[in-house]
Amino acid sequence: MEAAFWFDSWEKGGFYTGFHRHDIHPYVLKYFTPTELRDKTVLVPLCGKSLDMMYLAAFADKVIGVEIVEKAILAFFQENNLSYTQPDANTYIAGNITVLRKDFMALTPEEVGPVHFVYDRAALVALPTSMREAYLYAIDRLTDIGTQSLVITLEYSPSLPSAPFSISVQEMEDYYGAGHFINLAESPLLMQHGMVRRWNLEFLYEHGFFLTKHTNGVILHKEEQEQAICY
Ligand SMILES: C[S@@+](CC[C@H](N)C(=O)[O-])C[C@H]1O[C@@H](n2cnc3c(N)ncnc32)[C@H](O)[C@@H]1O
């Protein structure tokens, strides 16, 4: 969704920020073990006030969250009793956690530095198809060969016109397949999920993809994807 939608969501809170979890995501606990995280930098695009950053920061060398809405950033530090410093208006630092108040799609590698892991929960699925190419370009620009990503997505039916969007396994292949080895590590059917009840969904899967980047700069343009499907 566009930035205005998110500013409005954080302003209204409650139902509109229903994506926020009050626990550490189980896939994070399973795939980002303390040993894996040691001495690593984790990039968390579209981080909101995710508690997962607290877990990641306990074991990683550095956690860099990127969030466009200041209200979410301030809530993160306040709710976790972290006092922060601000070396500039858009950077918030507490210990080894840095949160950048930036449009993720416009971020440069100089602003982030080397990244070992990317943690995307509710980031790609927060974006309509028209915005995903810019997101994928940013991910490609900010990572290098060897970077590993945990990407948590939802796939459900019937599709809804707002975030979180349904993304199929095939779409993930289209988005990441050219530059990454893709491992669909988790795929439970969650019929008790709140969205199933709220929207009377037929099914909902919460996929956990573990990606390892093997090639830089190979994002497929939409036209190329369409051609690939035609051939
Ligand atoms: C669906 S929420 C997910 C938050 C977090 N990942 C979580 O799991 O709780 C998406 C977040 O991305 C932020 N956001 C949306 N567009 C953004 C952009 N272009 N750059 C940075 N943050 C953005 C929103 O304000 C919102 O907090």
Image (cartoon, grey):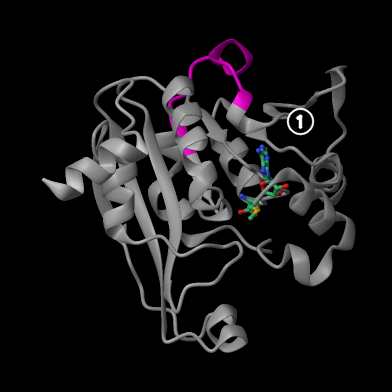
The answer to whether residue 4 shows anywhere in this view is yes
**Relative to 117, 81 lies left or right:** right
**Is 144 or 163 nearer to us in this picture?**
163
Count of labels in the image: 1
- Could you tell me which residue is drawn at 33 percent across and 21 percent down? 217
Q: Amino acid at mark 1?
A: Arg
Query: Residue 110 in magenta?
Result: yes
Q: Image point 32% across, 53% down: which residue?
A: 171
The local secondary structure at tag 1 comes to: loop
- Residue 37 point in image, percent of width and height: 46, 34
Along the viewing direction, whichever of 86 and 179 lies nearer the viewer: 179
Image position of 172 with respect to 187: above or below: above
Residue 64 appears anywhere in the view: no
Q: Quadrant of the C terminus?
A: top left
Considering only vertical position in the picture, is 75 above or below 221? below
Which residue occupies the foreground of this view, 17 or 105?
Answer: 105
Is ligand 1 closer than 8 angstroms to the Cβ of mark 1?
Answer: no
- Look at the image and say whether residue 152 sits in the magenta stretch: no
Place of residue 209 in the rendered image (x, y in percent of width and height, measured from the top left): 34, 51
The residue at the point 57 percent across, 79 percent down is 195
| Residue 63, image x, y percentages | 60, 31
The region drawn magenta spans 106-118
Up-down: is 65 above or below 205?
A: above
Give the side of residue 163 with respect to residue 224, left or right. Answer: right
Which quadrant of the view contains residue 157? bottom left
Q: Nearer the viewer, residue 29 or 190?
A: 190
- In this rendering, is residue 110 above or below 24? above
Left or right of 5 on screen, residue 152: left
Residue at image mark 1? 101
